[in-house]
Image: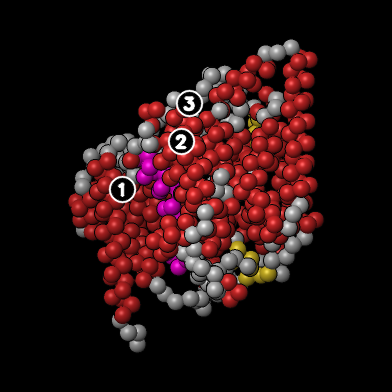
Amino acid sequence: MEVFGPVTPGQVSFLLGLFPVLIAWIYSEFLEYKKSSSPAKLHSDLSLENLSNEANKEEEKAILLEGALTKSPSSKSRSNPNIKTSLMRFITMDEPFLLENRAVLRAMSEFGLILVYFYLCDRTSLFPESPKKYSRDLFLFLYILLIIASALTSFKKHNDKSAFSGKSTMYLNRHQTEEWKGWMQVLFLMYHYFAASEIYNAIRVFIAAYVWMTGFGNFSYYYIRKDFSLARFAQMMWRLNFFVALTCIVLDNDYMLYYICPMHTLFTLMVYGALGLFSKHNEVPAVMAAKLAACFLVVIAMWEIPRVFEVFWSPLTILLGYKDPEPSKANLPLLHEWHFRSGLDRYIWIIGMIYAYYHPTVEKWMEKLEEQEAKIKLAIKTAIVSVAVLVGYLWYEYIYKLDKLTYNKYHPYTSWIPITVYICLRNFTPQLRGCSLTLFAWLGKITLETYISQIHIWLRSGLPNGQPKFLLSFIPSYPLLNFMLTTTIYVLISYRVFDLTNVLKNAFVPTRDNKRLFQNFVGGIVIAISLYFLSLVLLKIPVA
């Protein structure tokens, strides 16, 4: 088996951390088996599945919140010793400690083994690769087939109450936004798999819609919940960056290869900062107007004034820099990718905030509209839909049809148009608002995981920082059978990573114990640094 690329200290550190966790988990399973075989003893720990189900149930409680950023309280409080004591009990294989933390050890082991699978698929010759091929007929056939299957098997009506009015208005409800993310993500992934370059401009709109939801969802959460706690902040950062950070270490990639992660992190932080500053005055319209204006001014200063972006972000080049191994892009500045990606959607997150702020007002208008006489209601809705369709058509004819380079210049200022048109058409009747295709909604919950995983276990790059130009091939010469098999494995693993991320978040990011949170943070840094220096020593040892 050939390995592509050098062995790095980060990869050795990862393995040094994974091996003892695997040993501890296997031993804990043996202890549990031994314990369960004795009728005098009862199970005292929760299974991984139960922990995962609890996390998912808690996530459903978040309102108008982007699915990737849901609130998940940590597990029920126990007696939590300090990090030193826990580490010593782990090193000495203390049996009660291992039994108590068996589910967490299993989650850590499973997560680590999944990343090992990533490496085997993408950086070794264990599995072959095949070239990408695009057929518009096949592309449309597969996508339409998925829509039909979803409509026949997962169509569902909802009667949730509005967080603002308490009525079943359902305007831009959670089910709808999850479904929205799901069908866009499918097209986004198929665009990469089949190299469907002709829909490039549509993909730019989809990414803008994701960023719009970041502004909309986070604003809705903070405006309603008023939760600016350290724990909430830590949970957000864990959700956005835990998986991608470990993937970068194991695959030796730059953070910017997965550009959606730093983009969402940046715009999430900006929403958090905008609403967290003088948060007691958020309900004052003048204060909110000033905050939104300040957001626009920050964006204008950062992206529209020459040199400001480079000066501001240059200290973070080590984190946000990207060196494309493609020879034709070798001379690009390290911050070029970050400037390009973040600049394309620099305004749309603010538009999402504005829509979230006026969400209650629009809901009230819609409630009044539904109470009108049938003729008046029909006339108003017909006018709204007609205007939306006309605006959408004009955007399509004069903006969308532009070549990709020209389109990119207009995109930051026009991406709100198709998003608004979609919202209007998706919400103009109670029947449309109150139903969703739950298959797409399910896929919408794991967009972060499917985005990161696709590069390594569905596609192949084959080298550090490389773009995925090939397909992972388990069944050579049978492209459709291979597509079916690799897609099944890829989606299942992505969903498993989603569950494991939540389980580990519950274990290491407590919601109401800042002291323990700080201890876990410092302990994690100390352990990471120790493993890194140990890996440097091991790599210096000459191989015979």
The picture places residue 435, in percent across and down from the top left corner, at: 66, 30
The picture places residue 13, in percent across and down from the top left corner, at: 34, 67
| Residue at disc 1, secondary structure | loop
Q: Which residue is mark 2?
A: 291
Would you say residue 59 is visible in this rendering? no
Q: Is residue 105 left or right of residue 189?
A: left
Outermost residue on the front side: it is: 305
Q: Which residue is mark 3?
A: 285
Residue at left 28%, top 60%? 527
Would you say residue 22 is visible in this rendering? yes
Distance, label 2 to label 1, CA atoms, is 45 Å
Distance, label 2 to label 3, CA atoms, is 10 Å
Density class for disc 2 (Cα within 10 Å; few <14, some 14-19, many ≥20) is some
- Quick one: label 2 or label 3, which is nearer the N terminus? 3
Residue at left 60%, top 44%? 209
Q: Is residue 186 above or below residue 368?
A: below
Q: Which residue is mark 1?
A: 101
Tags 3 and 1 in contact by the CB under 8 Å rule? no
Q: Is residue 270 left or right of residue 378?
A: left
Question: 238 or 32: nearer the eye?
Answer: 238
- Quick one: label 3 or label 1, which is nearer the N terminus? 1
Residue at left 29%, top 51%? 521
Q: Which stretch did the figure color magenta?
A: 231-254
